[in-house]
Amino acid sequence: MDGSLELKVVILFQISYADMKKLITLITGSLLVVSALAQAPDFFHYQALLREPDGSPMANREVAIRVDLIRDQVDNPSIYLENHEVTTNDLGIVNLKIGDSDFFKEIDWGEGPYFLSITVNGIHVGTSQLMSVPYALYAEKTGNVNDDDHDPTNEIQTLSLEESTRELSISLGNSVVLPLSPWREIEQDIYFLRNVGIGLLARPGYPLDIRKAVYGQHDQPLVRLRNTDQATIAYTGIAFETIGDGDKPTSSWMRSEFLQTSDNYDVIPSFRGMTAIRAAGSGFSILADSVAGSIRFYTTPLTGTIVEQARFEPGGNLGLGTTDPEARIHVKEGDIFVEDPDRGIILTAPGGKRYRVTVDNDGNLQGTEVVLK
């Protein structure tokens, strides 16, 4: 033994799950490796990986990094700062030596917590708590404290976690309540217990809240469900479920689907390549929830064209081939074709009787009284 002391201290940073989902510039912690002759180090090494906005490493780039040391609260003024002009390596990594021999010796590392704030090229990329102090610096201030009883057992402390309250405490010391994560894991499934917001919104108001300024032909889909299976029963869609007969003890789930079948779909051949709505319970309804709302049906007979083929007006008139129906059923530029010779049009006489109007082989109209249910 040559009397030297090698100190290895890992300084951890707390980064929330939500932050990890973002593209962040700073993703590594710090590693302190110091060799000294039985004395406290005057600095610690800090290593960081910098990335471009697209996620690729910021390789071989000159960057300006400001390091601030903050005590007690993250919004407190900096008690120490350094500015570094460095160049990243091929992997986008920079290594900094942080510390001042005179100033660091004056810091009481036991009077924390302490936070490290990092700014890169004028952009603040994060503030993280130093989860362990530089032990050698702290030990230098406390190493000469008298311990007259020479009993090592009363120097031992116990770290414990109370599951019900999530309180982490150390004997003869303080405690902290650990934040409850919104993530839950049950067997192979992962659950998120809070609302999720995607896009342009300040705070999600629904379990999944997506907002986006959509423009252009290549930016239209907000949500995409894609099934790459080409089997004859494969399709993709969205299922809607609710409880049917909810006031009964034996309630059952009602399920409807909005789905898209493939060209190979063979369960119902006429549904191949179709968008379909499968409704359970009382059936399927379309609601135009407005006093001026109409229900319209369109087709595209030619590329780049959209033609309205039918419309229900708010008053209930149905127009076929017209956008302004003037009767309960208004047909424009077309016929009403009744193929069955025993069927026709049922009319009501002034006296209340109803007659089915058909035509004979000579083209003469015939009226037959009918009784409707």
Image: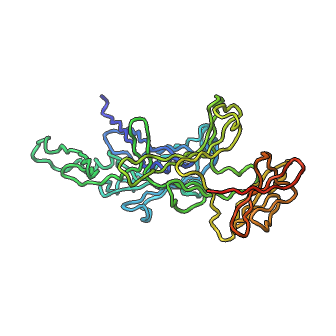
Return the x and y of residue 79 as percentages of the image width and height.
Answer: 42, 61
**Residue 58 seen by the camera:** no
Return the x and y of residue 206 as percentages of the image width and height.
Answer: 51, 58
Compared across the picture, whether 155 is left or right of 320 comes to: left
**Residue 219 seen by the camera:** yes
For the point 11% across and 42% down, which residue is it?
151
Q: Is residue 292 above or below residue 232?
A: below
Q: In front: 304, or 198?
A: 304
The colour scheme of the drawn protein is rainbow
Instruction: Tell me the quarter of the picture where residue 310 sits.
Output: bottom right
Residue, far right: 362
Residue, far left: 149
Return the x and y of residue 214 as percentages of the image width and height.
Answer: 69, 56
For the point 59% across and 41% down, which residue is it?
92
Q: In front: 183, or 282?
A: 282
For the point 42% across and 65% down, which residue is it?
76
- Report the label total: 0
Placement of the N terminus among the 4 image quadrants: top left
Return the x and y of residue 98 as percentages of the image width and height.
Answer: 46, 49
Placement of the C terminus among the 4 image quadrants: bottom right
Instruction: Tell me the quarter of the picture where residue 73 sits.
Output: bottom left
